[in-house]
Amino acid sequence: MGNLLIFEKGADGRVGASLPALDVPEKDMSELLPPSFLRSDPPGLPEVSEPELVRHYVNLSRKNYSVDGNFYPLGSCTMKYNPKVNEDAASLAGFNLIHPLQPEAFSQGALKLMYELEGLLKEIGGLARVSLQPAAGAQGELAGMLMVKAYHEAMGSGRDKVIIPDSAHGTNPASAHLAGFEVIEVASNADGLVDIGRLRELSGPDTAGFMLTVPNTLGLFEKDILEISDIIHEAGGLMYMDGANMNALVGLVRPGDMGFDVVHFNLHKTFSTPHGGGGPGAGPVGVSDALVPFLPAPTVEKDGDRYYLDYERPHSIGRLQAFNGNFGVLVRAYAYIRSLGHEGLREVSENAVINANYLLARLKGHYHLPHDRHCMHEVVFSGKKQKEKGVHTKDVAKRLLDFGFHAPTIYFPLVVDEAIMIEPTETESKQTLDEFIEAMISIAKEAETDPEKVRTAPHHTHVSRLDETEAARHPVIRHRKL
């Protein structure tokens, strides 16, 4: 019975709930809806009892991997465990039941939270103002690049080129292009950092800005960041920081102090929201003084004891969406930051960095390490040793599933052949990391002694190895009776 589809269970007439008979006259549905919207036949849903229905969804949830079940070492995504107390805060009736079109007079608590959250993010980022509107990091990027464009247009500079490293997140060039800029790629040097000499050559009177991830996607801190900022600013451009990797920096350094003019924060990564599968998310974007006039409207303002939304911003890039951000994510972030405080946030970053360097030290003898130096919150290995035995990075990732772990990010960043990108986060204990390390070492040994076992993995999951390419191109997303 456990392997049957829910469509193969139940029986005709079986129901999951018993409702009393209608005590009001039943209307002809054609009086309520046009006939073209009415079914002529029932929808063909399975007819099951309540226990069968509950078991169906519980069994599905058991097959789904989550950070509540085990370690989720997805590089560059900060898939960490988030305290449930922040979920409780977001579920308070005054927050959970509020309507985005509710009058300001009845929304003072929510507006106060947003105003104070902006203040906290300003302090964390070393920035002048922060917009909470963007619903994700990519939308925060787009907002930032639109503000960069609006700034240069207001200055009459006509600058149209944005420089981006070859190791950047894929959303960076996409956001710059969508904002109307031409993207210029700058190569990394042998140390995996921005090639300063090449950056000088590319910077000039047409440079609108430079988009940089700090730490970069190799998990390395750009040690020449102040020089990079000087090069771009001297050319008349603006510095943009992709804040997806902020979990390595909070409480340690502030982007504004490093010369960044625009920064987006992934609240759902760094500041407590379970995410994945497309949401939920929040990507507030902060700016330096020069870009404040161009912030998305409305902004949250305070007049005495009253909080309000300011729509009168003549130079604003406008709205990003119908409402002012994903409010539930904002509540979680506010609760997380307030509960930890500065010292707690600093400890988060320190522990994330320590955990990543522990993985680096334990695994570098078993997997190739492209850049053998201290990393920040994530470490990038290469499976080139295993590739020599006919075992690819994808095979290693598949075999890891048999040990009960989610696979790390693979084949990114693109500048590393057979990349294996691991981010342990601060919430994992040494015991969990040791279990993961032993699994990775076992797979490395299997690649030497029994490569076929790794190439044909996984062997103990609910389904065997899938053809992801075929599944993406020809998805089967509904059940049809044969």
Image (cartoon, rainbow, N blue to C red):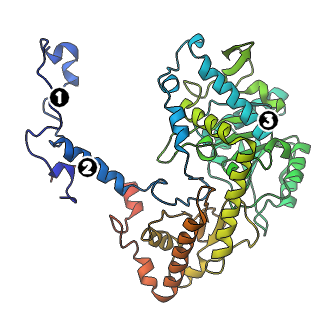
Closer to the chain start, of discs 3 and 2, is 2
On the question of residue 179 being in view, the answer is no
Q: Relative to 360, is 100 on the left or the right?
A: left
Q: Nearer the viewer, residue 211 or 340?
A: 340
Q: Residue 197 in the image: x percent, y percent?
A: 87, 60
Q: Relative to 431, is 65 on the left or the right?
A: left
Mark 3 or mark 2: which is in front? 2
Question: What residue is pinned by disc 1?
Answer: 39
Mark 1 or mark 3: which is in front? 3
Q: Relative to 127, is 133 on the left or the right?
A: left
Closer to the chain start, of discs 1 and 3, is 1
Question: What residue is pinned by disc 2?
Answer: 56
Amino acid type assigned to the residue bearing label 3 in the image: Leu
On the question of residue 321 being in view, the answer is yes
Question: What residue is pinned by disc 3?
Answer: 127
Indicate the secondary structure of the residue bearing disc 3.
Answer: loop
Give the vertical position of 358 relative to 311 (above or below): below
Q: Residues within 10 Å of mark 2 (few under 14, many from 20)?
A: some
Quadrant occupied by the C terminus: bottom left
Quadrant occupied by the N terminus: bottom left
Residue visible at 55% across and 80% down in the picture: 386
